[in-house]
Amino acid sequence: MFSRITSLFNIKYPIIQAGMVWVSGYKLASAVSNAGGLGLIGAGSMYPDVLKYHLQQCKKATNRPFGVNIPLFYPDLEEVIEIIFQEKIKIVFTSAGNPKLYTQRFKEEGITVVQVVSSVKFAQKSEEAGVDAIVAEGFEAGGHNGREESTTFTLIPMVKEKINIPLIAAGGIATGSGMMAAMALGAEGVQIGSRFVASVESSAHQNFKNMVVETKDGGTDLTLKELTPVRLIKNEFYQNVQKLYQAGASVEELKNLLGRARAKKGMFEGDLVEGELEIGQVAGLIHNIKPAADIVKEIIDEFEIVRKNISNLSSFSI
């Protein structure tokens, strides 16, 4: 299955596992890479020494390409960058920041750089900064999102129209048919997060994995836009956020409720009441927890079935 994305990363399938906080450790990243996709370690929830451990363990667990996702607001960013250089990591996905600040520095070390964006404007700025590919993420996605609230279905063709470098679609994709739809709109690969949360190798707490499987249509919401927009499961913490909104809460009051380590409490420690449970709208299509390799195979098998079905439509005239 060839595309500019498979060529860029030297992978079999154009499937990238998102580098999610509290979920994407070396076990998940190596499992996806071994299955033919591209696994990413999520640095956003790791202290520098923890990240170094995961990078070293991932190199032992797979001889295939893998990368790391770095939020550019990371407090120990300089130390993290040095670790990436020391460990000779060759693929870096950056998010939540200005790619102009670090892209050339990464490129000088022979690193392939991909920027995650949520709008056409930032896709263009990222291309100007010299990144090798773009992940355009619709607001269906779990976790932290852009403020534009553009859906994947509209964002992908709008970005495709304005850039020349390879485009990866993200947000609301968990199946082979979703992958086919994204590629029909102009993407050359897909980045998948929520489906891999509910994998055996995910470092998410079992309670959270089970909650993802139980989440139905309408079970998530994009909220806390005054701070950083985030899509959450509608648990008790979420309901408390809504009560503050109804009471006309200030930004400071919202910050106080959010506190510290709320995502860790929910996703990593399994507190389904007080924790922040970040997942995408596509959770309603996730019905089981299975090994990452089985997830990749399931997506590719469905993609091939859909492709054959579409080819059969050629006999129809309009």
Image (cartoon, helix red, strand yellow):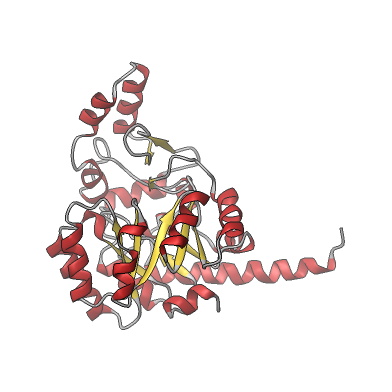
306, 14: nearer the viewer: 14
In the visual, does 38 lie left or right of 163?
left
Picture residue at 37% right of the left edge, 75% below the top: 33
Q: Quadrant of the N terminus?
A: bottom right
The front one of 65 and 174 is 65
- Residue 26 place in picture, x, y as percent: 25, 69
Residue 2 drawn above or below residue 27: below
Residue found at x 35% / y 31%: 226
Identify the image quadrant of residue 201.
bottom left
Tell me which residue sits at (48%, 76%) in the image. Answer: 6
| In this view, 5 is above or below 284 | below
Occupied quadrant, residue 39: bottom left
Quarter of the view holding residue 66? bottom left
Residue 65 picture location, percent across and down:
35, 78
Measuring from the top left, give residue 261's x and y in whole percent: 19, 43
- Answer with left or right where residue 227 lies relative to residue 170: left
Disc count in the image?
0
